[in-house]
Amino acid sequence: MADLARIYVHLVGARIRSQLEYRLSAAFQLVGTALLTALDFAAIAAIFANVDQLGDWSIREVALLYALATISFALTDLVVGHLDLLPQMIREGTLDGILVRPLPSLFQLVAADFAIRRVGKALQGVGVLIFALVTVDIDWSVGRVLAIPLAIAAGAVIYAAVWVSLATIAFWIVDAIEVVNAFTYGGSFLSQYPIGIFARWLRGLVVFVVPIAFVAYFPALYLLDKDDALGLPRAFSFVSPLVACLAAIAATAIWRNAVRHYRSAGG
Amino acid sequence: MRLHFELARRGYRRYAAYPGATYAGLFTNVFFGFLIAYILLAVYDERDVIGGYDVRDAIAYVWISQGLLSVAAIFGPSWYELARRVQTGDVATDLQRPLDVQRAELAQDVGRACYQLLWRAAPQFLLGALVFEITIPDEVARWLLFTISVALAVVVSFGVRLLVNLSAFWLLDYRGQLLLALALSQLLSGATIPLAFFPGALDTIARLTPFASMLQAPVDVYVGQPLGGSTLAVLALQGGWAVALYAAGGLVLSAGTRKLVLQGG
């Protein structure tokens, strides 16, 4: 484990240095990414320019939800976002090179890149988080202070687990990357809004099947001392870390099973 | 003309070759369509009309705009395919062929748009219309104007994308300007939220940009809420952008060709 961590730091360090060779381009991309992400919040702001409430949530409360979801997703994107390249590696057969090396395959894929521009996403989320924390009414306690970093970390793990699990579809259907996008990017978009406004089937899906409701929505209910619109028990607000652990275990198992089905393009 | 028809067919078949990708893309469009539709339904719980759009117009916007995302290529590889060829030097092959590069690219893009219209936009629009209550115009004339508007949207989008691609002649690492262009396209085309939701003058300013001509304009024509109240004026604006961007693209292409340095010669 310590070995893997050392190798990870080494590989990712090299990736970061190589991107910093082109400083202006890296800076452009970081700002561009921050702006592109800010658009999601601009959409929320445009909505609240017309209405005061969205399913009983004020703009400040939605901002908190948005910030938690965005920071978690940015961390996930930073660490595993390049799994989007998996279909290409399978098509071209370059995954072979990874499978013959004496390191876990998922680890190698994850360590293969670290796109600095994605930090822009997180920075934008932190900006909104500060806005939310300053303006929203929270009944502060030790639990609530701890809940923020814990929710962000658990949320990032949940997103990563969803991403890894779905990316394995590529082992069977190589050009289905957009289905994965529906749940990764779509999931991140969805978790920026209070789940209560969505239809029943969709709420069921994100609570019980693809557990992205635990990324921001349930932790935000706890922070804001709100009840779930569906009437789910209060305990759901505390279980995000547990859900994250279970999701991570499930994702690793799914990945191991999927890799066994890999047939190289080279025959 | 025959040549360009053949090129358009190749553009169509290039996308038709990967039906799996089409189904996957359709799935994503439909999924996002549902998300945005539910968000807008929650918004319209609080208000009856926003910027001229009632709830049925707004849900029609969702399913048309999700379709136009692919037809008018609001994002996607066509924003950087040519730029990548400039970066690698492959563009030299394109320039050596005895045909007008810009016209040939446009023909292939029209083929691409036709494919997306038939296999992505149309099915998911029908699905949206079945599941939700949406505005369906009953005059034939409006459907005709809508069709013209969609066609113009594709040409405007082509013009914008070509300019972004050609910027690689001057800035070899095109990713920075690409991201900025995509951000603008996403926001100002109305792809995230109807431009009618923008407060005050921001709405009008956004709708005058070429980006709005790529997506919001056809939707406005469809629901009968054109900028300034005149559908013909909106079509004229789209046509103006289409011609201006095409002309600019031609100038930039010839300037870029003159300064092209092939790496590795």
Image: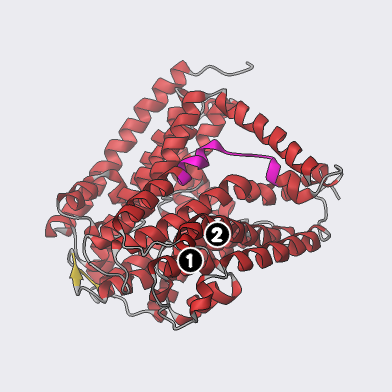
Is label 2 or label 1 in front?
1
Counting from the top left corner in percent of width and height, residue B38 is at 38, 73
| Residue visible at 33% across and 49% down in the picture | B187
| Label 2 environment density (alpha carbons within 10 Å; few <14, some 14–19, many ≥20) | many
* Residue A238 badge: none
The dot on residue A155 is 2
Image quadrant in which the N terminus of chain B is located: top left
Say if the magenta span includes residue A118: yes
Magenta residue check for A80: no
Give x and y (percent) for residue A259.
Answer: 80, 57
Foreground of the two, B235 or A254? A254
Question: At 58% from the left edge and 29% from the top edge, which residue is drawn?
Answer: A19
Name the residue type under label 2.
Gly
The chain that hosts pointer 2 is: A
Question: What amino acid does circle 1 point to?
Answer: Pro
Chain of the residue under label 1 = A
x, y (%) of residue A109?
72, 46
Q: Which residue is mark 1?
A: A219
Q: Nearer the viewer, residue B265 or A60?
A: A60
Instruction: Please say whether residue A262 is visible from this viewpoint.
Output: yes
Q: Are the two marked residues, 2 and 1, in contact with CB atoms closer than 8 angstroms?
A: yes
Q: Quadrant of the C terminus of chain B?
A: top right
Along the line of sight, the residue nearer the viewer: A180 or A174: A180
Q: Which residue does the image show at 74% across and 51% down from the upper left?
A: A106
Structural crowding at the residue carrying mark 1, measured as other residues with C-alpha within 10 Å and reported as few (<14), some (14–19) or many (≥20): many
Q: Secondary structure at mark 2?
A: helix
Are discs 2 and 1 located on one and the same chain? yes
The span shown in magenta is A110-122
Residue B135 appears at what percent x and percent y? 28, 75
Q: Quadrant of residue A144?
A: bottom left
Q: Give me the C-alpha separation between circle 2 and circle 1.
A: 9 Å
